[in-house]
C-alpha cells in the first residue's frame, strides 16, 4: 500500500500536471510547461492535426487535449491508483470544457450551500479535510487518519 506522504505527493503531482495542461491555450495547443510534463513521463504528444481535432471533439474551451492529460494522469497514478486518475481526468474535463461564466456561478452556488466537498483551487483530486491525503469521492473515511468525511 502507498504511504500517506507518497499519496500526498501523488496528489500534488496530479494538480501540477493538470494545471500545466489547463494553461494551454488555444484548446489543443502545446506549450512548453506541458510539453516538459509529457517528456518527463514519456508520454507521446498527439500530432498537430490530431490535437486540435481532439480538443474540438471534446468541446474543450482550453487546455491540452483530454486523451493526453488522461495518459499523464494514468502514468502518474499507476495501476494501483487508477480510480484516482479517473477522477482527476473527469475533473480536468470539467475545467477544460467550462465556460468562464458557468464556472463562476458554480463557485457561487457552492459557497451559498456551504459545501465543503469542492475542490481546492487548482486541485484535481479531493482531499481529506483533516490530514490532506487525496481521496476518492465515494470514500467516506480517510484511510490514513480515520477522519469521517461528511
Ligand atoms: Zn485523513
Image (spheres, helix red, strand yellow):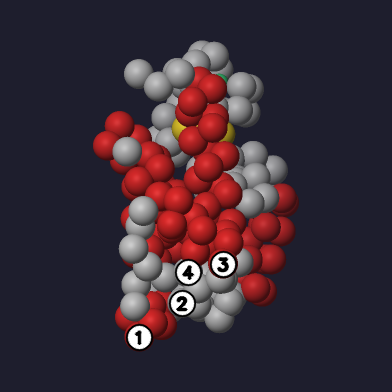
Residues packed near mark 1 inside 10 Å, few (<14), some (14 to 19) or many (20 plus): few
Instruction: From the image, tell me which residue sits under label 4.
Output: 64
Residues packed near mark 4 inside 10 Å, few (<14), some (14 to 19) or many (20 plus): many
Instruction: From the image, tell me which residue sits under label 1.
Output: 49
Instruction: From the image, tell me which residue sits under label 3.
Output: 32
Residue 37: image location, x then y, percent: 49, 55
Q: Which sits earlier in the primary sequence, circle 4 or circle 3?
A: 3
Viewer-nearest residue: 28 or 141: 28
Q: Which sits earlier in the primary sequence, circle 1 or circle 4?
A: 1
Q: As displayed, is residue 150 above or below residue 101? A: above
- Secondary element at tag 4: loop
Q: Is residue 145 something one can see in this rendering?
A: yes
- Is 29 placed left or right of 74 in the picture? right
- Secondary element at tag 1: helix
Q: Could you give the CA–CA distance between mark 3 and mark 1, rounded to whole angstroms?
A: 18 Å
Label 4, ligand 1: CB separation under 8 Å = no
Numbered tag placed on residue 28 in the rendering: 2
Viewer-nearest residue: 116 or 84: 84
Amino acid at each position: 500500500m502507498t504511504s500517506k506522504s507518497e499519496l500526498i505527493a501523488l496528489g500534488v503531482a496530479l494538480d501540477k500536471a493538470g494545471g500545466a495542461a489547463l494553461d494551454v491555450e488555444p484548446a489543443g495547443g502545446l506549450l512548453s510547461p506541458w510539453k516538459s510534463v509529457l517528456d518527463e513521463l514519456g508520454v507521446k504528444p498527439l500530432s498537430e492535426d490530431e490535437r486540435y481535432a481532439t480538443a474540438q471533439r471534446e468541446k474543450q474551451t482550453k487546455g491540452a487535449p483530454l486523451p493526453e492529460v488522461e495518459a499523464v494522469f494514468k502514468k502518474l497514478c499507476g495501476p494501483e491508483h487508477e480510480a484516482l486518475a479517473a477522477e482527476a481526468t473527469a475533473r480536468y474535463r470539467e475545467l477544460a470544457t467550462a465556460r468562464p461564466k458557468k464556472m463562476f456561478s458554480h463557485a457561487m452556488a457552492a459557497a451559498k450551500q456551504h459545501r465543503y466537498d469542492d475542490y481546492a483551487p487548482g486541485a484535481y483530486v479531493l482531499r481529506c479535510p483533516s490530514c490532506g491525503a487525496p481521496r476518492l469521492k465515494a470514500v467516506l473515511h480517510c484511510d490514513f487518519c480515520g477522519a469521517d468525511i461528511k
